Image (cartoon, rainbow, N blue to C red):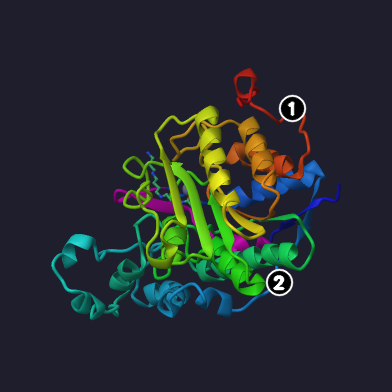
Amino acid sequence: MPPMKVVYTPRHQAHDVSRETYLGQPIPANEVAERAERIREALVADGGFELVEPTEHGLDPILAVHDPGLVRFVAEAWEQGRRAGIERTYLVADTYPVRAMFEGLSHEALARLREPREIGGRIGWWGLDSGNPIVEGTYAAARWAVDVALTAAELVLDGGEVAAYGLCRPPGHHAARSLAGGYCFFNNAAIAAHAVAARSGEPVAILDVDIHHGNGSQQIFWRRRDVFYASIHADPLTLYPYFLGHADEVGEGPGAGANFNQPLPPGTDDAVYLEAVDRALDAISETNGSVVVVSLGFDTYRDDPIGTFALTTPAYHEIGRRVASLGRRLVILQEGGYHRPSLGDNARSWLAGVAGRELDPGPAGGRGPEGARIPG
Ligand code: SP5
Ligand code: ZN
């Protein structure tokens, strides 16, 4: 079997964050460069993968999905913060335009709201949360993450690959048309899904298996029938992004029925999770199209520092195997996953499952006997 192609660039390191804030407190950043480096090292050491550099795709594929104002903001934010004399090594918002501020306003009044000029206001206008640091190299890295995703999509669309993996960093699925947040700036998976749909003329499905609901992907395709969005995530009443991801969010207009959320409780284990995977795959198999974009998160892992699920490394092999058994071509894009020591094993396990390759646990593999049994 030929090696699976892994799209990677060291330019993600420009998004060099060290701290984020949580409830106003500075804490060590979760979404750090070491994540992607760990995954790359494990896949290279495995031998069953081939690294490929991304090619540049310009702004058009981003602007097909995002508000130009968001792109301008991400491009300008760091420098504007510097001009405002902000000395911290990251920027988070001061004030957010939250729902209750606009209660009672008509659609017309809402449409008259406008972006502020001052940086504190701009970050709030375009930002979802205060845990999303922006540093000097954020824009460059976010642009390259999109190029990684689009290059992976092209390997599948034009390059004859059955599956390709894009090691995107920063991740993307919390970024909506006009919103950055949740460590995300541009929605790599949504941009790739739109590009595949536009290029192939076929419908596309997104399968989102990050523990957090992909509110950005849901929002972008909410009214579209040609991109089916299926997500398995922690119940938003219990985890970020808190306000979207409920099972009764099914899409509207032409997109009604093309959004499938499966919120699951804290403590969800391999067996419960795999049942949800089967339901998502059944739903996807009822849609037309030959390409599935996977938003792949390893924050479902039992030791993840911000997750609440209890998945094991062998489960990722089984999930990859079941996703591949759909028989569709796969554009697999990295989202979250913050337990750094396990990221390499977990990525290798998932992708080997896709490739139909058995993995011996090896000295660095598995995590002991309790992780070794896969139900179902
Ligand atoms: C792509 C992705 O996985 N984004 C996740 C964004 C999560 N943002 C909220 C992080 C909250 C961190 N909480 C730390 C306190 C632990 N007690
Ligand atoms: Zn996540």
- Indicate the secondary structure of the residue bearing disc 1: loop
Image disc number at residue 363: 1
Residue depicted at 43% across the width and 29% down the height: 267
Residue 168 percent across, percent down from the top left: 60, 58
Q: What residue does disc 2 label?
A: 55
| In this rendering, position of residue 113 left or right of residue 239 | left
Between discs 1 and 2, the one toward the N terminus:
2
Badge 2 residue CB within 8 Å of ligand 1: no
In this orientation, which residue lies closer to the viewer: 238 or 264? 264
Residue type of the residue flagged with mark 2: Thr
| In this rendering, position of residue 314 left or right of residue 110 | right
Residue type of the residue flagged with mark 1: Pro
Q: Which residues are magenta?
A: 9-27
Residue depicted at 33% across the width and 48% down the height: 242
Residue depicted at 74% across the width and 27% down the height: 363
Quadrant for residue 239, please give it. top left
Residue 109 percent across, percent down from the top left: 19, 78
